[in-house]
Amino acid sequence: MLTFSAGMVDIVGYIAVYHWFVAHMTGDTVHLGNQLATGKWSDAEKAGTIIGSFILGSILGRAVIEAGARKQQRAIASVTLLAEAALIFTFICIRSFAVSSRAIPVATLLVLLALLAGAMGLQTATLTKIGPLTIHTTFVTGMLNKFAEAMSEWLFWLCDQRRMGNRWQGSTQHRAFRNARFMALIWFSYMLGSVFGTWAYSHWSVWVLCIPVTILIISAGIDQRRPLAIEEEKEQTQE
């Protein structure tokens, strides 16, 4: 749910705010360097705003999670999820108002970029572990790398089993294969969110982001019933 919503936010932000990604800090950092080198200060300001807002959102998100852990508040993730939903909804309202004008003022544009990048930073900080696995729900480059690592481990395991004359029965239950499948699902969810977001934007403009807002509110409700902190502890105990 979170990865699907992040894919939607990223692509709608890209389409609605002059082709700037709000979750790809690697690409934005390259853009920042290029624009600084070529003296395009206005674009450099936009890239810097995105990166700074993402970092600030991540810092605030981890601070809230850590404070909740110290006070033994297991459902603390609800706070960051609802804060993210509020940032995205604020973006919807401002962008819908600004669409009536021919050009978005630079100050408004920076606010729009900061809102979405800050929201992605908050989400990135909210859920970082599933058992021993480090995960990211707002960008998938690391997930593809972890998928490749897990698949490599699984393929070597299959070769070892064959060399020892063992059957491959139950090989899909091997830890490495299950991890690879999970990472692939995260990537696919993000891609699916971007596909749906692109299609839906052509019909409902930025109001399509009400779907990620709804998903985040539902996720906060789930966190109240089955806190993410407890689920992570269970996974770590099982491992």
Image (cartoon, rainbow, N blue to C red):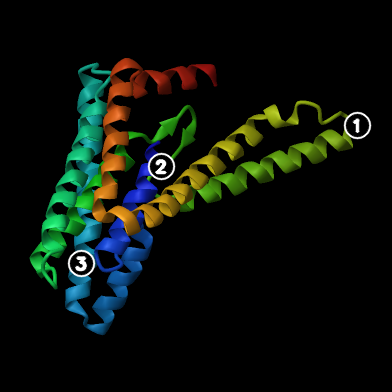
Residue at 17% in and 57% down: 112
* Disc number lying in front (2 or 3): 2
Tell which residue pokes out farthest to the right in this image.
165
Q: How many residues crowd around disc 2 within 10 Å: few (fewer than 14), some, or many (20 or more)? A: many
User: Which numbered circle lies on residue 3?
Assistant: 2
Image quarter (top left, top right, bottom left or bottom right) of the C terminus: top right
**Mark 2 falls on what kind of element?**
helix
Q: Which residue is mark 3?
A: 46
**With 95 as the anchor, is 22 left or right in this view?**
right
Is tag 2's residue or tag 1's residue first in the polypeptide sequence?
Answer: 2
Q: Position of residue 90 (x, y in %)?
A: 14, 47
Relative to 160, say whether 238 is above or below. Answer: above
Tell which residue pokes out farthest to the bottom in this image.
38
**Mark 1 falls on what kind of element?**
loop
Relative to 226, say whether 216 is above or below. Answer: below
User: Which numbered circle lies on residue 165?
Assistant: 1
Instruction: Report the amino acid beneath label 2.
Output: Thr
